[in-house]
Every structure is written in structure tokens, then in C-alpha cells.
């Protein structure tokens, strides 16, 4: 009896696999990840969005984000005073798992915190999209074997009951968890179902329903051409936050064209999507720094959450490029003793803010990045805006004209060390 069932499952899986191989898709599905950061006197927002080549799917994602923004704006009260404790925070992050070429599982994770949220607000929306069928899949579409599905249903029920026996009645469970259930997240070999945002996770390795994605590690070929920086001549460090984005590639090309390097303080949640761009960036001699995983307000997190934000980012950069960032730039530019105490990374802010996040005018950005620049300045920009990319083409030659050499944050530190040594050594 048991053997028969196993055979049935295997057969069905084989059929699914074969049919998906036969149906070779000609069109590659694409996506783009962007982070939008907003700061107002009363709140901060960091929203990472997924935009795909399917309009319908994009609309589901946008509707969710817009709804969450509305909830946030309704609850957030006008605060003004203290920068750190006086503001509310909205953070929306994503998780994407490509199950096969046509089936993607996307999760949108929302948190709201701050003075207007005595109890932090958490929400998660998961969806599984099939590009071929142009529709959202439910649990029955994913686990097509009815025996396997009823087994899963039973396990989920038992897990919920163990967690909280009185939380849910049999009737409500049946209403919530049926064949049409869609709020599940699939990561590697774990499937997590969300009921009232309460996660119930099951291992699905043995069901081999999900094809494991093979992650390719790019081979980094760092250029051997050593830059010659004269420590006795003025230096300036260009730094870019919140990326990578669709503009990063061009920014890297501009830097290469002018034969200069910069430092990029990146978000861990975008590393996999921009793997190739980041690889080229490192190869060209640019520096990668840590700017948290998903732009949570680091100075307001618990120690555990803080360490997770930093370490998750270090790990993903290390795993993908065999590269270890040396610097942390805390989100929203705020440093606390808790951050200092809980990281070995060097913390760096900036001395010149181009305010490219505020000014939409390219000339305004150029002005701020080139007027009254001093030796050793660290210039803050964001590689998430077209205007920043456009202004960079002008900024570099103007600063070069003024006699500046371009250094990364690490190189700037080196230059400072050399200068100090030279000063201390008697001539
Ligand atoms: Zn930032």
C-alpha cells in the first residue's frame, strides 16, 4: 500500500518534470529590484519593490505596497522632536524564490514601528506566480498530488494546534486552509504557511516538489593595475548608498571611463539580483561596504536584529564574491553605541551630502558635489537615481580639474595613515 503511494507520487513528479522540460519557454522572465527611501519630519520609509515583465503580477505587488503605505500613513501621527525616537518607520522587503523558469514565489514583508506603533505591526503577503498561465497559483497547483496535499494539511493543522490549541477551531482551519490557500513562502526546502501572520513551516525536501536552484559563483578577476595615489596631493572619496539598482551598471562604467574608483554601500537583499554588476564593480577596483540587509533603521533595532542585519549582508557578499566588506554605513546616518559595540566593521558616514535624494535637478547635485570640496572629503550619493548617474559624468572631470585624486574609503584611510607617518618621521 505504502509503496504504491510512493510510486504514484514519483510518477506524478516525473510527469510534471517531463512536461515542463518539453514545454520549453522561449521568453525569459525578467525582474528588477529597486529600493525607494523616503524621509520626512515624521517618518522614514524604505520600500524594496520587485518589478517583473508581467503587468498583472506587478499590479498585485504595487496594490499590496500601496495598501501598506496607506495603513502606515493613517496610523502614523505627526511627530517632530527627537530624530531617533520621534519618527515612525515603514519597511517593506521582498524575498524571491524562482521555483522554475515559469513559477516564482514572491514574499512581501512589512514592518511598521516607532512611537505610533506601541505594538510593532508585521505583515507578510506571499504569492506564487506562473508566467505561462499568467495567474497566481494556490497550494493545490503547487502540490498537485492529492495524497501529498492532505498529508501537508494534516501536518499544518497539528503544528498550529501544538503552537496554540485554542487559537483556531477545526471549522476556521478548514475555511482558512483549503486548496485555494495562497499565502505560503517557499525557500529552499522549506514551505511556510502564514495564518494571521503566524508562520507554520514544513520541510519539503523528501517530496522533491521544488527544484533547487543552482547558485553560480562568479569568478572574480580583480584588475592588477595598481593605482598610484600621491598621498601629498588632495584626495576625495565618492560613495554611493542604497544600491545596487538599474543605474549602478552605468555608474560603474562612468567610473571606469574616467579611471577612478568609488565605494558602494549596498543592501544585502539586492546582492543576488545584481550579482554580475557587483562582480564587475569589484573587478574594476571599487569597494563594497555594508549598508544593512534591507535598510531597517539600525540604531533602533534590538541587538539580535542589528547583528542579523549586518551579518546577513556580510555573509551574502562573502558567499557571492569571496569579498569581505570592511566598512559599515548605518542607515539614515545614525550611529549609536549599540552599533559600535556589536560590529567589528569600521563605521563611516560622510562629510559632504549631495542631497541627490532631495534635489531632482542635475545642476544642483553637481554644484553640491564640486563646490567647496576639501582634501579628504567623503561625498555621499545614491546609485538609485538617474539624476545621480547623469550628474556623475560632470562631477568627476570638474573634481579632477580641481586637482583631486579619487579614492575608496579604504584608500582614504591608507592615505591618512601615510600622511600621519610622514608627519611623525623626522626629516
Ligand atoms: Zn541608506
Image (cartoon, grey):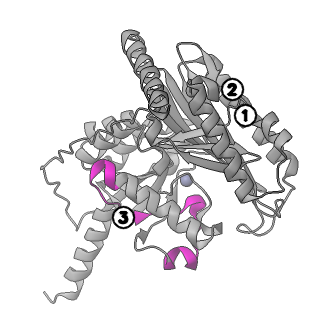
Nearer the camera: disc 1 or disc 3? 1
Task: Note whether ligand 1 is within 8 Å of mark 2.
Answer: no
Image point (54%, 37%), residue name:
34
Give the residue at mark 2: 60
Give the residue at mark 1: 64
State the SS at label 1: helix
First-in-chain label (1 vs 3)? 1
Image point (71%, 36%), residue name:
65
CB within 8 Å, label 2 to label 1: yes
Q: Is residue 336 magenta?
A: yes
State the SS at label 2: helix
Give the left or right position of residue 129, taking residue 222 as reference.
right
What's the CA distance linking mark 2 and mark 1?
Answer: 6 Å
Callout 1 crowding tier (Cα within 10 Å): few <14, some 14–19, many ≥20: some
Image point (56%, 70%), residue name:
304
**Nearer to us in this view, 408 or 133:** 133
What's the CA distance linking mark 2 and mark 3?
Answer: 49 Å
**Nearer to us in this view, 104 or 332:** 104
State the SS at label 3: loop
Give the extent of the magenta segment. Answer: 318-341
Amino acid at each position: 500500500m505504502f509503496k504504491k503511494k510512493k510510486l504514484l507520487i514519483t510518477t506524478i513528479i516525473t510527469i510534471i518534470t517531463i512536461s515542463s522540460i518539453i514545454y520549453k519557454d522561449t521568453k525569459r522572465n525578467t525582474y528588477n529590484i529597486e529600493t525607494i527611501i523616503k524621509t520626512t519630519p515624521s517618518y522614514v520609509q524604505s520600500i524594496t519593490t520587485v518589478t517583473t515583465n508581467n503587468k498583472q503580477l506587478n499590479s498585485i505587488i504595487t496594490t499590496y505596497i500601496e495598501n501598506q503605505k496607506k495603513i502606515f500613513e493613517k496610523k502614523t501621527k505627526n511627530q517632530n522632536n527627537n530624530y531617533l525616537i520621534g519618527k515612525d518607520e515603514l519597511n517593506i522587503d521582498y524575498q524571491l524564490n524562482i521555483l522554475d523558469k515559469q513559477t516564482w514565489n514572491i514574499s512581501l514583508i512589512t514592518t511598521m514601528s516607532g512611537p505610533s506603533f506601541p505594538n510593532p505591526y508585521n505583515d507578510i503577503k506571499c504569492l506564487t506566480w506562473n508566467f505561462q498561465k499568467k495567474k497566481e497559483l494556490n497550494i493545490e497547483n503547487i502540490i498537485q498530488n492529492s495524497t501529498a496535499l492532505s498529508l501537508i494539511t494534516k501536518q499544518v493543522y497539528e503544528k498550529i494546534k501544538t503552537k496554540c490549541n485554542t487559537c483556531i477551531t477545526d471549522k476556521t482551519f478548514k475555511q482558512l486552509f483549503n486548496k485555494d490557500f495562497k499565502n505560503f513562502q517557499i525557500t529552499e526546502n522549506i514551505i511556510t504557511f502564514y495564518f494571521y501572520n503566524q508562520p507554520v513551516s514544513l520541510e519539503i525536501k523528501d517530496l522533491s516538489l521544488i527544484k533547487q536552484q543552482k547558485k553560480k559563483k562568479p569568478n572574480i578577476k580583480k584588475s592588477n593595475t595598481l593605482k598610484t595615489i600621491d598621498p601629498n596631493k588632495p584626495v576625495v572619496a565618492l560613495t554611493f548608498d542604497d544600491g545596487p539598482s538599474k543605474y549602478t551598471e552605468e555608474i560603474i562604467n562612468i567610473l571606469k571611463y574616467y579611471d577612478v574608483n568609488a565605494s558602494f554601500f549596498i543592501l544585502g537583499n539586492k546582492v543576488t539580483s545584481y550579482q554580475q554588476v557587483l562582480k564587475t564593480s569589484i573587478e574594476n577596483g571599487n569597494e563594497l561596504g555594508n549598508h544593512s540587509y534591507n535598510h531597517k533603521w539600525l540604531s533602533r533595532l534590538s541587538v539580535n536584529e542589528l547583528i542579523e542585519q549586518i551579518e546577513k549582508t556580510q555573509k551574502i557578499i562573502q558567499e557571492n564574491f569571496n569579498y569581505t566588506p570592511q566598512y559599515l554605513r548605518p542607515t539614515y546616518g545614525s550611529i549609536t553605541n549599540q552599533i559600535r559595540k556589536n560590529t567589528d566593521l569600521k563605521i563611516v558616514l560622510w562629510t559632504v551630502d549631495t542631497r541627490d535624494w532631495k534635489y531632482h535637478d542635475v545642476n544642483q547635485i553637481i554644484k553640491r558635489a564640486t563646490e567647496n570640496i576639501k582634501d579628504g572629503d567623503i561625498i555621499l550619493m545614491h546609485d538609485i537615481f538617474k539624476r545621480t548617474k547623469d550628474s556623475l559624468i560632470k562631477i568627476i572631470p570638474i573634481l579632477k580639474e580641481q586637482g583631486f585624486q579619487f579614492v575608496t574609503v579604504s584608500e582614504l584611510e591608507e592615505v591618512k595613515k601615510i600622511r600621519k607617518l610622514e608627519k611623525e618621521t623626522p626629516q
